[in-house]
Amino acid sequence: MTKNNLLSEKLNYTGASHTPTHLHFCTYNTEILEYRQGASIKEFAPFIRPDAINWVQIHGLQNTEIVQEVCDFFHIDFLTTQDILNAEHLTKIEEHDTYNVVILKQLSVDEENTYTPQQLCIVQGSNFVLTFMEHDSDFFNEIHTALKNNTLKIRNRQSDFLLSVMLNSVMASFMSIISRMEDQLEDMEESLLSPETRSGLTLEDIQPYRKDARLIKKCILPLKEQMSKLFHADNVLLHKANRPFFNDVNDHLQFVLQTLDGCRDMISALVDLYLSNNDQRMNNIMKQ
């Protein structure tokens, strides 16, 4: 039986990751860029600067005390902390007085090309960004490279620009996945239409794509409704100068959703085409 979290003062991580909880700290502005690693926010407290953007990456959510220490330090409320530790939490974007919260799913792929959803939580304040991930990940390496090179003058911008870049990284990941799926489905269609090779494909070859399409839809579709929360003018943590970057995130989201619809139609067409080819082969056998 699922417990009522409003009646509990204890924090619990609900996921299955066994990654030990550890922190990566980055602080930057136009003049500095500093990196540190540690096991507790207390180690970084002396280096957090009010005149810089302070980015804390939390990998592994097993140790709820460390997660709570981070959230308490940045005045993140208890219910939001519970949401961060809930690995099955629905995708949402939420505005608070002093910070914005984004909870979404990203997909990681293993050596067998199997996709596994992983929760990503981003908390953005006026001079800080917190990212919570269940596993060790190099997902944001491109952003670190951009910080080192000051690409697009990223170190001159506010924390909401960093949030938009992170969301764009998520969208880019989905765009890569869905574009690869589209190419593979087109190859399968050509194979089924070719008399020489169509007999080599079976429904078992098509079924994984149906499963992946459902998983991608489950991860990405909730963002369609939630994204609008980042566009209203009352959100003081999202500056007008950076709104075009969030529009770009939304454009990429629409591309993923449209391409996903096309892939789902193509999967249905491939099943119909396979069944038609199979019926034709059976008819030819019966004639012989």
Image (spheres, rainbow, N blue to C red):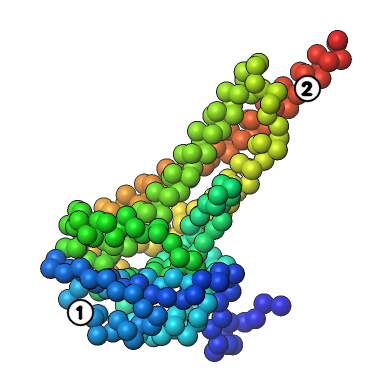
Residue at image mark 2: 279
Q: Earlier in the sequence, mark 2 or mark 1?
A: 1
Residue at position x 41%, y 55% from top?
A: 170
| Quadrant that contains the C terminus | top right
Residue at position x 71%, y 32% from top?
A: 202
Name the amino acid, label 1.
Answer: Pro
Name the amino acid, label 2.
Answer: Asp
The image shows residue 244, relative to residue 9, as above or below, that is above
Residue 42 point in image, percent of width and height:
34, 86
Q: Nearer the viewer, residue 272 or 247?
A: 272
Q: Would you say residue 285 is visible in this rendering?
A: yes
Residue at position x 41%, y 85% from top?
A: 69
Residue at image mark 1: 50
Residue at position x 58%, y 35% from top?
A: 265
- Cα distance in 3D space between marks 2 and 1: 70 Å
The image shows residue 56, relative to residue 200, as above or below, that is below
